[in-house]
Amino acid sequence: MADTVREIERKYEADSTTRLPDLAGIDRVATVVEQGVEDLDALYYDTPDQRLTAAGITLRRRTGGRDAGWHLKLPAGPGEREEVRAPLSDVPPPELTSLVRARVLDRDLVPVVRLRTRRTVRELRDAAGAPLAEVAVDEVWAWPAGEAAKPGAAGVAGRTEARWREIEVELTGGGERDPGLLDEAERALAAAGVHPAAAPSKLARALEETGLRPARPEDRTAAVASGKGGAATRRKNFGAKESGKKGSGRKGSGKKGAGRKGTAGDLVLEYVREQLRVIVELDPAVRRDVPDSVHRMRVATRRLRSAFRSYTKVLDRGVTAPVGGELKWLAAELGVERDREVLTDRLVSAVADVPRTLRLGPVDARLRIWSERHRAESRDRVLAALDGDRYLALLKTLHALLEDPPLRPGAGRPAPEIAARAVLKDYRRLARRVRTALDAPAGQDRDVALHRARKAAKRTRYAAEAARPALGRPAKKFAKRVKRVQQCLGDHQDSVVARGALRELATQAQQAGEGGFTFGLLYGREEARAADRERELPRVWKKASRRKYRAALRP
């Protein structure tokens, strides 16, 4: 069973002459306690082309010390990583390898480099004796996996073995860890002539100093998944860089930065690349059931599919349509879990608003049982999708599409021109659906029409958001107005779904002899809420459909 800890640490250069300053007295540190020496032996795993390294991820098997086992480290922000741990075994454990499946795809994970570390540990404690941080002075030996080496040897032959010394300061104070302590420690170390390490990790330095090359810039899978910014950017020479397809000879291939002066191809490919990056980065979070991760991953799949449908002047619809179909499948699989989350929150909140005198029967218990049953079903469905071959094939197809994009002549046109056309085309589609919904008779026909209008509003909003680098503030304001329409329609659709769930709950309660009065009361409230949204829609639509917002989009 894997467990997770948040690692917040900083690394510093050191040599044989480096001496630690006295850290007692900085911030809340009252005493510095010697913790002895540990001998650590770690074998690092990656794909042959080092895709994990390119993404700032490390996977290792380590013996010795207090936390022997398998460790998977995932970027979690500047100076922070999520460390997922599993017990020792001979091969990488499935509970960890599944978390990097979206990165490695169908590549094997193999030993890359071996590190032995002699660690001298000091613990920083407050006046009450509680631990605040650990300061480790590490003597490190590294060499390529599979090669014989003699740690401690004086020389480095052919750059296949490396040796260095470094200092780590890591917060250990449980839920009250204060990054300010790291700042104070850094100032004290700087005063003693100790400077931050150039390499972001031991693995990165080992790969450089042993002559093992990091992931290639042209490795599109690693580069697209890593994206620009975050851990990949901080790693400088150790991460992958973005580049366009070599020798394509086609305009709008994604080489230039997207913006007002770029091409439509630059704009759309950058947007597609960003959504794929989000999907890949969120994959381990979804698997670990991190709050809101399913929602964010589903939004990225929808944005990606929407881009394929909106920007048909840039990307060949004949190629992207099948990919869009697979994205629709993935969004639906994620949607089961996300829709359950939203519906449960809505119903729990609704029950809480009912006076106790009107809560007849075990309403809370009935709702909890219903929610847990649906949660187990939806959770299993999401994990089955992410573990399946279909999902893996979709990711590989998206990477291939970015490697060799199916560009149409419009890709070479100025980005503002094509972006405005795409947004306005989607707006016209939205306007038709809103008019249809407003004219539909009350009841199921109107519910269906409003739901179709909601989907059109979402697509229009996504098209405008994608256009922001090219169209600037007008696209931002337009997307904001359309989002309000989408929210109005979305609340209406949520009410439709909630009423279906309340009917199911009332039936179950009735069959169990509990009575369904409270669920019927909530059903009536949801009907009234939906009616409110229907009355609100004309006003919201009138504001969003003002001509000036569309006129501002035109370059």
Image (tube, helix red, strand yellow):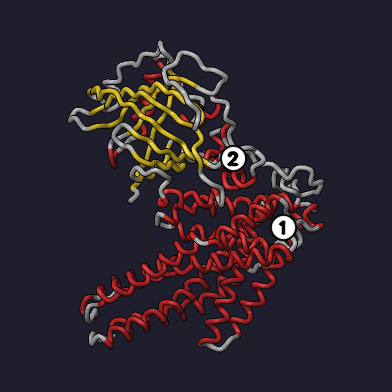
Image point (28%, 83%), residue name: 509
- Expressed as whole percent of the image width and height from the top left, the position of residue 345 reads 37, 67
29 over 492 or under it: above or below: above
The tag on residue 154 is none
Q: Is residue 201 visible?
A: no
Q: Which residue is mark 2?
A: 49
- Check disc 1: other Cα within 10 Å, few if <14, some if 14-19, many if 20+: many
Please tell me in which quadrant of the rendered image residue 84 appears. top left
How many numbered marks are there?
A: 2
Q: Secondary structure at mark 1?
A: helix
Image quadrant of residue 36? top left
Pick the front one: 294 or 387: 387
Residue type marked 1:
Ala
Q: Residue at x 79, y 47 (%)?
A: 248
Circle 1 is placed at which residue position?
419
Q: Position of residue 87 (x, y in %)?
A: 33, 44
The residue sitting at 65% across, 74% down in the picture is: 431
129 to 500, vertically: above or below: above
Rendering coords of residue 326 (x, y %): 60, 65
The span from disc 2 to disc 1 (Cα, nearest Å) is 37 Å
Residue visible at 61% across and 47% down? 221
Q: Nearer the viewer, residue 145 or 303?
A: 145
Residue 414 in picture, x, y percent from top left:
78, 52
Give the position of the C terminus as an image quadrant.
bottom right
Label 2 crowd bin: few (<14), some (14–19), many (20+), radius 10 Å: some
